[in-house]
Image: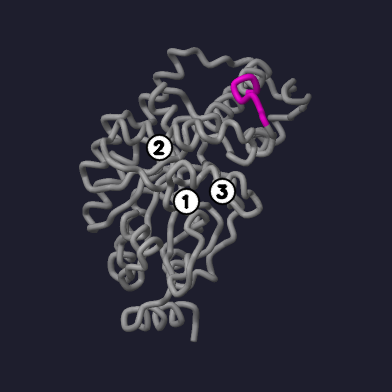
């Protein structure tokens, strides 16, 4: 039997008995790659047409679930519907409202949108988008960044490799002063982003609080993505409360509803981080999502603060998507290099 036949057989089996796991998908932007406006193109993980096609498939073979369904299962043992699938969007880009929401509504789907509160509040660009813009608009072919340690990069050889190295600095460096690093990079590139230019790009690409509220009024769930989208494992433990509890309180104040879920920035697992795990629990979250590829078993007691999600990508055609959505073992073990 070929791959298509295997998937078809499994889908028929799922329709009869269901399979004992929750599949969770992680999106960021639903946009054409050419519509990124100079921002980090890696975050366009489905075109509008792809997203519509994916939801059409999921609506036929899966049951969409929301945060309340997952928490009821985790805390109270309430059964999830047959073949559950959880849809999520990280970061709060404007396409969540203008592109994704109409498609979700057309298919009767529900999604959770994880919001990093400080960027919405202060109208600032995400650090990875500032990196992308600095590299793209550099007026020299070679740069040397001074902080946190001298780093020379050849942009003419591979701007994408340079961008990846710079992003990894933010993701891996303990106690990094991110604003100092970004200013050092922009100085090295010879292109300093003015406040007016930054605000213009933000207003074009990022939702406002009023737009986040529109998602909630449309029946979508809103969760935390911390305040400043820092990788929690790189922070001093004294900063965890502000990022975790602070973001939850800001969301609840803005929305007037409880916020019980969080997606960890860049999606690292909490494994081996007992102090961080304790901080997440102390901040009042009932469920936490990673970007570790995998599914959450529904036949046992899963780790509520370490729920895996599959990162989506525009390279997944319809056959590939249907295969790994149906047989999670076929999913690529994507390296976590996204917001």
Q: Nearer the viewer, residue 3 or 246?
A: 246
- Residue 231, horizontal then vertical, whole percent: 58, 38
- Residue 181, horizontal then vertical, whole percent: 65, 23
Q: CA distance from mark 2 to mark 3?
A: 16 Å
What's the residue at 21%, 45% (across, down)? 218
Q: CA distance from mark 1 to mark 3?
A: 10 Å
- Residue 287, horizontal then vertical, whole percent: 44, 53
Q: To which residue does mark 1 refer? A: 288
Q: Residues within 10 Å of mark 2 (few under 14, many from 20)?
A: many
Q: To which residue does mark 3 refer? A: 277
On the rendered structure, is 50 left or right of 306?
left
Q: Nearer the viewer, residue 319 or 86?
A: 86
Q: Nearer the viewer, residue 182 or 2?
A: 182
The answer to which quarter of the image holds residue 124 is top left
Q: How is the rendered protein coloured? A: one colour
What is the span of residues highlighted in magenta in the rendered image? Answer: 175-181
């Amino acid at each position: 039997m070929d791959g298509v036949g295997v998937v078809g057989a499994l889908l028929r089996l799922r329709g009869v008995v269901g399979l004992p796991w929750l599949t969770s998908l992680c999106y960021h932007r639903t946009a054409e790659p050419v519509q990124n406006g100079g921002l980090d193109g890696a975050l366009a993980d489905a075109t509008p047409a792809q997203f519509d096609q994916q939801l059409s498939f999921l609506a036929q073979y899966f049951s969409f679930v929301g945060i309340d369904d997952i928490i009821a299962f985790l805390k109270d043992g309430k059964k999830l519907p047959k073949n559950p699938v959880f849809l999520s969007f990280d970061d709060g880009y404007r396409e969540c409202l203008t592109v994704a929401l109409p498609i979700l509504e057309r298919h009767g789907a529900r999604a959770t949108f994880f919001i990093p509160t400080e960027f919405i509040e202060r109208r600032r660009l995400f650090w990875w988008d500032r990196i992308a813009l600095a590299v793209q608009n550099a007026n020299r072919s070679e740069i040397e960044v001074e902080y946190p340690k001298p780093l020379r990069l050849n942009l003419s050889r591979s701007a994408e490799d340079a961008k990846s190295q710079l992003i990894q600095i933010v993701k891996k460096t303990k106690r990094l002063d991110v604003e100092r690093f970004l200013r050092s990079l922009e100085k090295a590139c010879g292109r300093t982003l003015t406040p007016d230019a930054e605000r213009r790009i933000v207003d074009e690409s990022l939702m406002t609080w009023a737009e986040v509220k529109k998602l909630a009024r449309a029946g979508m769930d809103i969760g935390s993505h911390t305040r400043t989208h820092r990788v929690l494992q790189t922070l001093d433990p004294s900063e965890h409360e502000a990022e975790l509890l602070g973001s939850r309180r800001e969301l609840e104040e803005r929305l007037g509803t409880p916020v019980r879920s969080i997606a960890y920035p860049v999606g690292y697992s909490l494994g081996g981080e007992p102090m961080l795990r304790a901080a997440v629990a102390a901040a009042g979250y009932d469920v936490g999502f990673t970007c570790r590829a995998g599914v959450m078993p529904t036949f046992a007691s899963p780790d509520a603060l370490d729920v895996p999600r599959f990162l989506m990508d525009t390279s997944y055609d319809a056959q590939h998507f249907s295969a790994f959505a149906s047989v999670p073992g076929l999913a690529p073990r994507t390296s976590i290099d996204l917001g």
